[in-house]
Image (cartoon, rainbow, N blue to C red):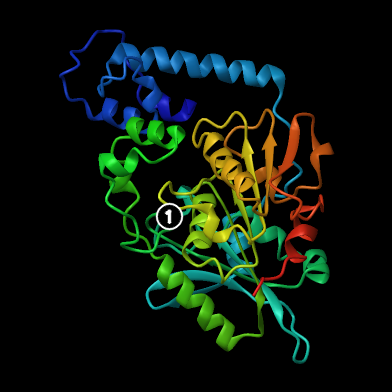
Amino acid sequence: MKCFFALFILTTTTVSAQTADPRLERILQRFPDADTNQDGKLTRDEANAYRALLKKKKAGSSSRGEPKSPVKRYTESELAEIFEAREFNGLLYRFFAPETIGEEKYPLLLSLHGAGGKGTDNRKNLKFWNGIVTEPEFQKEHPCFVVAPQSDGAWRVNGSEPELTDELIGTFSKTWQQVISRRRGFAEANTGGNLQTVFQLLDHLAETCPVDTDRVYVLGHSMGGFGSFECLAMEPERFAAAIPSAGGLSPWHDPEIFKHVPVWAFHGDQDRTVVPELTEVVFNRMKEIKGNMKFTLLGGVGHGANAFAFVYEGDSMAPGFKTAVSSAACDPAENIWDWLFAQKRKR
């Protein structure tokens, strides 16, 4: 956030709310809470006040000390060496195959990048967790295929989103109503998508590789966390389990459709980019319907929930980490990967 605002150092000179300033427009789109009077316009005074508030919060967070994650980092070049660059029906993706033996079949991980991975370079879609799951020791214990597609838009089946009328929005949770009202252009930003092609790719890989179709998993962070939930909502019979990090479920979907699919979701309680209430909405619904969902709220963590989610070994990792379950159906395993690879698709 600090770097973003550094690009837009504003003077304290008051500007009319009617004045169109593209810099202020961009700040408001990313930080809707900066509009303190909620009039849909952002003045320079409001922007400066919000910038000061962010600096104060960051200083407070630093003094408390965010938990340190033990994740191993990888450079883009290192990951590009590990994963083969491929294309399928216009969809760019990266692919990793385990060492296979005889007629044995292996699980497949579908890895969905966040907004920072969007593009057409077939490189930014590779993230640190892709490196973790390809390490020799990991593959020795959990051999699996890994596919990391790249999207230039939201992880959505093109045309699947409904028209967001006032009547429909009125049926959403209060949390989602607030998100939509504060984020202008929400509907436009979430149209399009190539998730249908991703599903076709999974079918193709199942036909051409020894994939265990009862052990296909989806995981991702931020936009990829939303995408993980979207996969379950669109094709709940395809996946054996999901790990959404710092995401949420589009409000026109009901978790009822995938309540049988094991989900372990993670979210930082200090996340200001994607508020943790968006995961809580899904979890509370799953509790109502006795679905199969674990929810780990990471105390003291901001938007970087993925730095803990994909190396999670239990709530003892740091004070303030707490996992709740939606029902007795949840697997109590504490290690994230042991939990994931134990899940099988329910037919």
Q: Which quadrant holds residue 181?
A: top left
Q: Look at mark 1 in the image and give the residue it sits on.
A: 118
Residue 105 visible here: yes
Place of residue 238 in the rendered image (x, y in percent of width and height, measured from the top left): 56, 71
Seen in the image, is 210 located left or right of residue 121? right
Residue at x-position 79% and y-position 68%: 136
Place of residue 6 in the rendered image (x, y in percent of width and height, measured from the top left): 42, 24
Residue at x-position 60% and y-position 44%: 283
Along the viewing direction, whichever of 172 and 344 lies nearer the viewer: 172
Q: Which quadrant holds residue 5?
A: top left
User: Which structural element holds mark 1?
Assistant: loop
Along the viewing direction, whichever of 60 and 245 lies nearer the viewer: 245
Up-down relation of residue 44 to residue 132 (above or below) = above
Up-down relation of residue 295 to residue 256 (above or below) = above
Q: Which quadrant holds residue 67?
A: top right
Looking at the rendered structure, the number of numbered marks drawn on it comes to: 1
Up-down relation of residue 255 to residue 120 (above or below) = above
Seen in the image, is 235 located left or right of residue 67? left
Place of residue 90 in the rendered image (x, y in percent of width and height, measured from the top left): 37, 74
Q: Amino acid at mark 1?
A: Lys
Instruction: Please identify the residue farthest to the front as the structure is shown.
Output: 289
Residue 113 visible here: no
Along the viewing direction, whichever of 316 and 145 lies nearer the viewer: 316
Q: Quarter holding the C terminus? A: bottom right
Place of residue 250 in the rendered image (x, y in percent of width and height, measured from the top left): 44, 49
Along the viewing direction, whichever of 261 and 108 lies nearer the viewer: 261
Residue at x-position 52% and y-position 39%: 278
Up-down relation of residue 74 to residue 56 (above or below) = below
Residue at x-position 48% and y-position 14%: 53
Instruction: Please identify the residue farthest to the bottom as the structure is shown.
Output: 102
* Crowd tier of the residue under label 1, counting other residues whose Cα lies within 10 Å: few below 14, some 14–19, many 20 or above: some
